Amino acid sequence: MTDLMKQLTARKVERRRQLAALPVGEKLRMLEEMVADVKKINATQPPKPVNPVRVRR
């Protein structure tokens, strides 16, 4: 494993430990916030594509 992979794995394990230590209510609140954020992203429409250059005749 490369150093980067080891760092990512260590961060992932640490984050899991932190989440496991939280009370259930706090985990649910975090989950609700994540779902709300995803809904906001999905609700916003991307900008329309710019029309390509038209050929003049």
Image: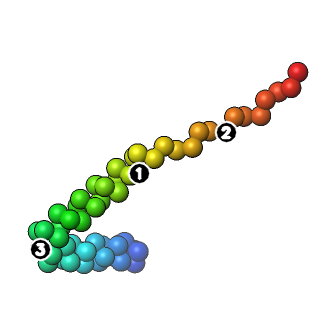
Residue 9 image-quadrant placement: bottom left
Residue type of the residue flagged with mark 1: Ile
Label 2 crowding class (10 Å Cα cut-off): few <14, some 14-19, many 20+? few
Seen from the viewer's position, the closer of residues 36 and 21 is 36
Residue at image coords 20%, 65%: 29
Whether residue 57 sits left or right of residue 47 in the image: it is right
Asked if disc 3 and disc 2 are in contact, CB closer than 8 Å, the reply is no
Q: Which residue is mark 1?
A: 41
- Label 3: which residue? 23
Residue at point 17%, 70% (across, down):
26
What amino acid is at disc 2?
Answer: Val
Specify which label sits upstream in the sequence, 2 or 1.
1
Q: Position of residue 41 (x, y in %)?
A: 41, 51
| Left or right of residue 25: residue 49 | right
Q: Secondary structure at mark 2?
A: loop
Q: How is the rendered protein coloured?
A: rainbow
- Front in this rendered view, residue 16 or 42: 42
Within 10 Å of the Cα at label 3, are there few (<14), some (14-19), or many (20+) other Cα atoms?
few
Tell me the residue that label 2 is attached to: 50
Q: Which mark is residue 33?
A: none
- How many marks the image carries: the answer is 3
Residue 45 image position (x, y, % from top left): 48, 43
Placement of the C terminus among the 4 image quadrants: top right
